[in-house]
Amino acid sequence: MKDFLYLDTDYLDSYLSQINNGLIEKTTDSVTDQNELKNEKNGTEKEMKTEVDAETKIGFPGFASVKGTGKIMAELKMPKSSLSFTETEIGQSIITRSVHDNALNDFFIYIDENKLYHQEPKLSSFYYNSIDFKLIDFEYIYQIFNNDLMKKLVPAFSHKAKPENGQPLNLMDSLKLCIEVFPFSSFLYGKNFIVPLKPDFLRGKSNELIFKYSGKISVLGKTTRKVGLLSEMNAQLNIEPNPFETTYQGIDDIFVQMLKSMDSTVDDKPYIISPIAIFCE
């Protein structure tokens, strides 16, 4: 059984729509007494047609009243607030998660049978492997070290600290810049890859995951970029980078140096893996 930490439902919705010619829009209730239910929303009421066994007078206060024996068809009008389980917020949440979890299984079977994934990052290819759980949340780290007592315990993370190794910014200022500039603040990482995490798809806050998990986790995603690759190509082709490229490369350098200050084993030019699912079993 998979314990999901992250699931990109937008990606799975796209997958579902492509294989089903559109997303699933309707669900049906399971009726245990095998009566045929037909619900039609109309204004502020629902019309319900059902076949029932009637031996005595059956009253539905405010709706209908019938008398007799045998089987009858009754047409009832119920307030729109009388919702089935599948129409409640909890029911819809359970159904949605079930659809996406099952879609992930189908998706993985597809890429596995067609040998579309690799266990090492490869540009424009799917990645699937079991990795060490290493999660960093810049906002959480900034919150920790912006505490007055922590500044005394770890002077290197003070705003007044001097930049190290010829860097233009000290660690706290670099951290603040990363939070303000990058589209994500939390990510998994390994020696040669970074897995950015979108908060909407995390099943829990990142600082909670840091506290709860350790050991190995499985990552399924797609390798979309290699940090510094554009600079390498420009250098090989003797092309002068434009101001935007120089700015982006500078931001990449600050990010990587920030990460290497926390873990020196990280490569200078890691791959970026866009995650589809992250889970442990």
Image (cartoon, rainbow, N blue to C red):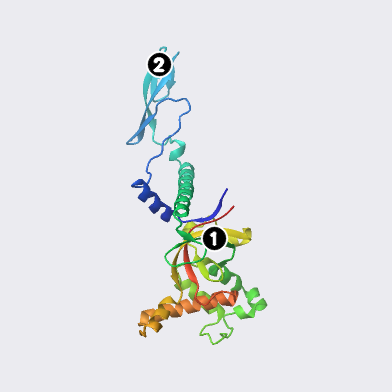
On screen, 3 above or below 156?
Answer: above
> Residue, x 47% and y 37% (percent of image)?
85
Q: Nearer the viewer, residue 161 or 209?
A: 209
Query: Which residue is depicted at the point 64% across and 74% down?
Result: 150
Q: Residues within 10 Å of mark 2 (few under 14, many from 20)?
A: few
Residue 267 occupies quadrant: bottom right
Disc 2 residue type? Answer: Lys
Residue 40 horizontal/vertical position (percent): 34, 33
Callout 2: SS: strand
Q: Relative to the observer, which residue lies in front, 209 or 144? A: 209
Compared to residue 36, the image places residue 154 above or below, namely: below
Residue in front for this viewpoint, 7 or 168: 7
Callout 1 amino acid: Asn
**Residue 273 in sight here:** yes
Mark nearest the camera among 1 and 2 is: 1
Which residue reaches farthest right? Answer: 153
Element under disc 1:
strand
Residue 73 horizontal/vertical position (percent) = 37, 20
Does residue 208 appear in the picture of this structure? Answer: no
Report the residue at 52% width, 62% height from top. Answer: 119
Apparent side of residue 221 relative to residue 171 in the rendered image (left or right): left
**Which residue in the rendered view is the most extreme toward the bottom?**
166
Q: Nearer the viewer, residue 35 or 214?
A: 214
**Which quadrant of the figure has residue 31?**
top left
Residue holding disc 2: 71
- Which label number is shown at residue 129? 1
